[in-house]
Image (spheres, rainbow, N blue to C red):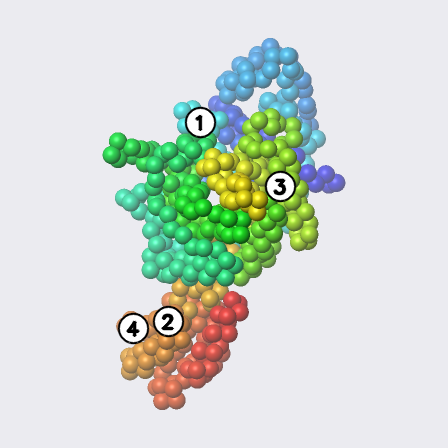
Amino acid sequence: MENKNLDLLRHSCAHLLAQALKRMYGEVSLGIGPSIENGFYYDIETEHRLIPEDLPLIEEQMKKISQENLPILSKTLLREEAIQLFTQRKEHFKLELIQELPHNEPIHIFEQGEFADLCKGPHLEKTGQIRFFKLLSIAGAYWKGNEHNPMLQRIYGTAFYSKDELKAYLFQLEEAKKRDHRKLGKDLKLFFFDEKVGSGLPIWLPRGAKLRDIIERYEIETHEQHDYSIIRTPHLGLAGLWETSGHLSFYRDSMFPAMDIDQQQYIVKPMNCPFHMAVYKNDMHSYRELPIRLFELASVYRNEKSGVLHGLLRVRGFTQDDAHIFCTESQLEDEICNAMKLTKKLLHDFGFDTYKIYLSVRDPQSDRNKYIGDPTQWDMIEQKYEEIIQRMGLEYQVDPGEAKFYGPAIDLKIKDALGREWQCTTIQVDFNLPSKFELSYIGEDGQAHTPFVIHRALLGSMERFISVLLEHYGGNLPLWLAPEQVRLVPISDEQLDYLSEVSRILKQEGIRVEVDRRNERMNSKIRLAEHEKIPFVAVAGKKEEEQKTLSIRKRHGENLGEMQIQAFVELLKNHISEKS
């Protein structure tokens, strides 16, 4: 088949699904059935409560309709004809959609056999062209996404033009399930959620806390090396801070309700920007001091809807690697460029060298009044962004209309081992906060000037980044990141004293090590270490104790043989220093 438009195929497959459901369950009211990034879905209302076991049966019905090779026909109806058609079919959701359409526009439907759906299209020509598909899951979804509307049943599926493409995608889905950070977090004893504590509020266990500590220490050290000053700000502040910044009017729904304290309203912070403005404003500044780079690993809290919470990817309390850079206009280009270079270094060290860059700019067709600041400044920054990205030889995509109201942005999405994209880095020039908070510096001319502010988060949310790390590596974290780098396993209890001494030596060298003292067989202890994805297992029996050596096994069973303790330490240190 020449037409390789997946949206066309998947939209047609959504109609195939709807027709199959109508044939199987009769009284089915159809919602909407769009194509999405990796497939399609259809929302329906029916008395039959769908269960996963229904999906293969529905697929069989879809295959029968495909084999019938029904023509897929586009028709244009008058408004009255469309209302009559969907009234006869008892499609009240379709009738609601028709009422929302402009009265002077014709109404488009697509028919295949006895089935008809309200749709602009386009679609394939015949149902026989839809051959390689799979129904994946069932979920609940409010009609039009409004929690005050009826809850519908949503069926997700995917479709491809070849059997091999479908097979490869389903394999990737299975791999993604194995790598699910929620499962790995439990297996590796990193974090958990407790409904008695609160939804969307992760609790970090010792190993998870150690992993966070490793990443955070690395970030702080790296930022200090790049001339950032580390600051700490409170977890809550007066509501007036966010009134001044403008966030209260734009993001009120995502903020937790204010608390009345001493007849004043306090809010747990949803973002750090106002605090960083206060830090800058605490002193008078000269142009000689700029740029000033303030960095904070800061916890913020957002009132996310319960339906969107998802492991560490979407939580209500999270920590950002947040920074604000205060600079002059002449320093702006260098500071944006330096932030991009620092991003590349950080991502490389964590094992991410493939990413897509999106340049979020104004929509040229939209009302320019929705953007704060001087349009000439916008033009200048958008042009600088593009020049910097091109000069660094990076591929990018311009996203019109994706700029925030206060400034354009460079956004990076990293690709993991399965080719999935994850939003992490954002670098934004802010035209709003410097003037709102009346920031200034004394220029070379002795006059007060307003600084430019670059707001950037490179790894983004610490919780989200760790979830991506876990899924990228399938839990097999590089040695430098592993909360436990070495597991010492005795052949018998007689070697426990020897391994305690080995543990002391390794810890003095900065190695994270544990001795397995459980009353279990050696093979059982090794299997547990493999299950917990410990990078190195060092076994000692009577011979090793006498010779002051260790038998070294790498993760996944590779046997390195017997090594002197100091040689093992050097091996570990080389791996760690190379971040391999």
Q: Which numbered disc, 3 or 1, marks the residue closer to the eye?
A: 3
Q: What residue does disc 3 label?
A: 381
- Nearer mark to the viewer, of 2 and 1: 2
Residue at image location 57% in from the left, 13% down from the top: 83
Nearest to the eye among marks 3 and 2: give it. Answer: 3
Q: Secondary structure at mark 1?
A: loop
* Residue situated furthest front in the rendering: 446
Identify which amino acid the numbered label 4 is placed on.
Answer: Arg
Q: Which residue is mark 1?
A: 146
Q: Residue 220: image x %, image y %?
A: 44, 58
Identified by mark 3, the residue type is Ile
Assess whether mark 1 and mark 3 are in contact (beta carbons under 8 angstroms).
no
Badge 3 local density, few (<14 within 10 Å), some, or many (20+)? many
Badge 4 element: loop
User: Rounded to the nearest whole Å, what is the CA distance between mark 3 and mark 2?
Assistant: 49 Å
Foreground of the two, 533 or 313: 313
Q: Nearer the viewer, residue 398 or 272?
A: 272
Which disc, if any, is residue 517? 4
Quarter placement of the N terminus = top right
Residue 207 visible from this viewpoint: yes
Please state the total of marks drawn on the protein image.
4
Residue for badge 2: 513
